[in-house]
Image (tube, helix red, strand yellow):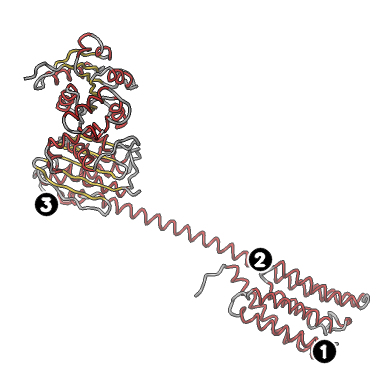
Amino acid sequence: MAPTELSAVVVDDHPAVRAGVAHWLGSGDPPIRVAAAGDDVRVAWLDDGADADVVILDLHLGGPVPVMGDLRRLVQAGRRVVVYSMRADDATALQCLELGALSYLTKAEGADHLLQATRAAADGRAYTPPSLAGALAGDRSDQRPALTAREVEVLVEWFQSESKHLVAERLGISQSTVNSHLEHIRVKYAMRGREAPTKAMLVARAIQDGLVRLDDL
Amino acid sequence: MSEPRPPADQVIATVRVALVCVVAVLQFGLGLRNLLRHDYHPRFLAVGAFVALACVTAATAAWVLRRRPPPEPVVAAGTAIVLAASVAATTATPAADQFGPADWAFGLIGWHLLLLLLDRAPVLFAALGVHFAVTVGHFLADGVPDRVELGTAGTVVIGTTAVQLAAAVISHLLSRRSREAMALAAERDRLATRVLSAEQWERGQRTAFAGHLGATLSLLADLADGLLDPRKPDTRRFAALAATQLRRLFAENDDVPDPLVHELTACADVAERRGVDVSLAVSGTAVDVPDHIRRDLTGPVAAALATAGTRARVSVLRTDTEVRVAVVSDAGAHATPANSPEVNVESGTYGQYTRMEARWRRQS
């Protein structure tokens, strides 16, 4: 029994996508209420949208340039953002994480991932869908954090199979260990690069959950 | 040990053999007879010169008759001895008899120099010039000769020298022509080799293509022979594999920025047409994958997709050190694709999932 219903604001320039996302969120268990939806980032700042727990943001709002500036402003204001994008390229995904988005989903990933990402974001946690795991596993940038061999294996297996059950079976670990590996990786990413309230939240959450110790920082 | 020598050397070697014969005949046929018949002052000088020249001929013949160029020290010493013999023989010959029957040495020394210095034109001309200067100088030193003497001397000098120079020039022309002919022949050989290797490459391509056709040819043959029943699921699976292999083969030679993903897309395409829900995930930027490695990476994917039932996820991951291509599907059984030397293929069944992964560790 959830004490309060979770709410989200959907920013996407396609009405069909907004309707679809609203339907998915509404048919979740428990359902997530769509407080506002629109084709402009303003809906996330005004009225009901300003109070929504999670912002589901499309990166391309009618223009060819991704709205990275809007993402940065939302994150700096402490909003929990799930980026939901057509683009599957790794560089964009990594850039969104760097700015402080809690999750990056491609539109090829379905309702299940969106629901999990939204719930995790509402809770101040990161969610790593398979495509993002692939981007992290293939990250060749200089500033990438050092991951352990096991963490890389978890990322690769999750990227390849989209099934935590299979990852757990293949690596001989439990599904909750798979999840904590994924969260640990995201904490490592959150601790590098520019600071953002959501990143601080992520790290604080990880300490609370016992995923990282204070002296690890 | 026979090192192939340049063709020019062959011509020079042949001309030299002829020259050794000419020198020997001239020296012991004409020269010796004249030496014995006439008077020389002092006689020992003339005889010494004759013996020295004979020795040079003998020494040179040791190499020339084996068709080898005489070594440089032999040539240098020989030339010095011949020029010394020129001075000695000329000194011993009375000036009045110069260029006459008593002058056994003038022409002979010219031929000697030609024999020694045939492949060194500038030195040859210089040595001939010295010899010419010595004899003519000696001839003129005894006072101005009359017109008849001058005429006789001129005829001998020009006649002898012209023949010798002509021999030198002709042998050089011949050697140059033969060099050109050899170059032409070598070029023709190279061309023939190129044509041959091109034909071989084409044959190889054709065989390789037939090889890459994989299951297609035997499938078609068995269908035609009625050995396979198109209604059986096994045959359909076989056909699915053949179709995927063919599609991949067609994609193989397309000129695209990311050939690996292009081929994987082609494989996924065929499976989708068969009703399989395929998702293709790509991570990492394109890296250079050699053709045969790409074939080893995509081959197992084609095989795995051919067995997929309703769902399959194809993924390609490229990192600094490796390329990993995987298929996770709901196929009931998995084929065990063979490992290639450079690509490690692993497959297994985990509950409802069948997983195949091909990994290639990049050098560097």
Name the residue: 34% across, 36% down: A141
Kindly give the residue lying farthest to the top in the view shown. Answer: A47
Please determine if labels 2 and 3 lie on a single subunit.
Answer: yes
Chain of the residue on which disc 3 is drawn: B
Circle 1 packing at 10 Å, graded few (<14), some (14-19), many (20+), is some
Residue B30 visible: no
Amino acid type, label 2 = Leu
Q: Position of residue B327 (x, y in %)?
A: 19, 41
Q: Residues within 10 Å of mark 3 (few under 14, many from 20)?
A: few
In the image, what residue occupies the spot 32% across and 22% down?
A68
* Front one among B177 and A85: A85
Residue A179 visible in the current orientation? yes
**Which quarter of the picture shows residue B18?**
bottom right
Q: Is residue B150 left or right of residue B73?
A: right
Element under label 3?
loop
Label disc, if present, on residue B207 of the rendered structure: none
Considering only order in the chain, which callout, 3 or 1, is on the residue closer to the N terminus? Answer: 1
Mark 2 vs 3: CB contact within 8 A = no
* Camera-side mark, 1 or 3: 1
Earlier residue among tags 2 and 3: 2
The residue that disc 1 covers is: B43
**Is label 1 in contact with label 2 (beta carbons under 8 Å)?**
no
Residue type, label 1: Arg
- Residue placed under numbered mark 3 in the picture: B227
- The amino acid type, in three-letter code, at marker 3 is Leu
Q: In this rendered view, identify the residue nearer to me: A17 or B268.
A: A17
Task: Check disc 1 and report its element: helix, strand or loop.
Answer: helix
Q: For marks 2 and 3, give the CA distance.
A: 75 Å
- Where B96 falls versus B260 (above or below)? below
Tell me the residue that label 2 is attached to: B173
Residue A113: % across, % down: 17, 28
Residue at the extreme left of the image, as rendered: A1
